[in-house]
């Protein structure tokens, strides 16, 4: 079935550093979503992208919907300890219902 | 505005048994989707219900079934449990499946 390739799988950074992660697909999506999941919780929506080329920010988070509609990236600036967690990208086709998730990027921050 | 609530939070079942998981959707949401998340993986789509009808299904066998009720709450039923069914089961609700999904905290199912 459809799969999203998310990279890197894990990141170990120092507090205050910037973070960049991306997601690629062999299929086109009409919506890209970025979620964060913490232990014992469900994914929480961070940013939603609805148009190719769209660049959207949410505080220190910035995400872009790739022009080809087959990729997206998420940047986190000036990381803080509460940014720790697993970040998932998800794609959704127009008119379809399901979200297709990547494998996740586990972010660890050293204070 | 209440979020998505799932019950129970944890469950241990024996191989071959049947299990029912429950989900109350966020107020105003008419679409409920269920996902299975194995350890260390991203969530995998099981199926979705829209206004009490199944509206899309992932690559899961028929022993995974569901219901949506008039108040838009939902159940996931799994028959003949297998060890590989051990996972976090997530429920997500949305309005018309186009405005983003709100996830519950999940039910951790362990099959022994």
Image (cartoon, rainbow, N blue to C red):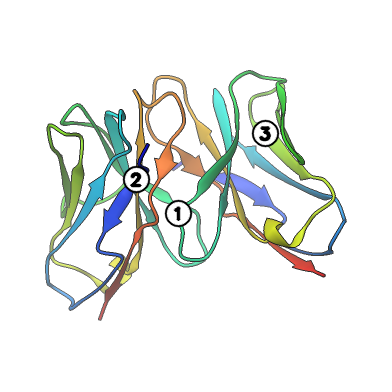
Q: Which residue is mark 1?
A: A42
Nearer to us in this view, B67 or A84: A84
Q: Which residue is mark 2?
A: B4
Q: Are marks 2 and 3 on the same chain?
A: no
Q: Which quarter of the figure is the C terminus of chain A placed in? A: bottom right
The reply to whether callout 1 and callout 3 are in contact (CB within 8 Å) is no
Q: Considering only order in the chain, which callout, 3 or 1, is on the residue closer to the N terminus? A: 1
Q: Which quarter of the figure is the N terminus of chain A placed in? A: top left
Marks 2 and 3 sit apart, C-alpha to C-alpha, by 29 Å
What residue sits 19% from the left and 26% below the top? B51
Nearer to us in this view, A96 or B50: B50
Establish if B35 lies above or below A12. above
Q: Can you tell which of label 2 and label 3 is closer to the viewer?
A: 2
Q: Position of residue A61 (x, y in %)?
A: 73, 40
Marks 2 and 1 sit apart, C-alpha to C-alpha, by 10 Å
Residue B44 visible in the current orientation: yes
Instruction: Name the mark on residue A71.
Output: 3
């Amino acid at each position: 079935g459809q799969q999203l390739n998310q990279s890197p799988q894990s990141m170990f950074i120092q507090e205050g550093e910037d973070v960049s992660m991306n997601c690629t697909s062999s299929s086109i999506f009409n919506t890209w979503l970025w979620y964060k999941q913490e232990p014992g919780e469900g994914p929480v929506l961070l940013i939603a992208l609805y148009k190719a080329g769209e660049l959207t920010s949410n505080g220190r988070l910035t995400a872009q919907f790739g022009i080809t509609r087959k990729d997206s990236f998420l940047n986190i600036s000036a990381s803080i300890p509460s940014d720790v967690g697993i970040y998932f990208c998800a794609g959704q086709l127009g008119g379809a219902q399901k979200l297709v998730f990547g494998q996740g990027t586990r972010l660890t921050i050293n204070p | 505005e209440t979020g998505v609530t799932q019950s129970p939070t944890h469950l241990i079942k024996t191989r071959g048994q049947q299990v029912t998981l429950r989900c109350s959707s966020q107020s105003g949401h008419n679409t409920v989707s269920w996902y299975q998340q194995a350890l260390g993986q991203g969530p995998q789509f099981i199926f979705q219900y829209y206004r009490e009808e199944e509206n899309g299904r992932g690559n899961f066998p028929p022993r995974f079934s569901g219901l949506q009720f008039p108040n838009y709450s939902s159940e996931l039923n799994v028959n003949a449990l297998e060890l590989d069914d051990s996972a976090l089961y997530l429920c997500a609700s949305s309005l018309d499946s186009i405005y983003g999904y709100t996830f519950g905290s999940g039910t951790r199912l362990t099959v022994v």
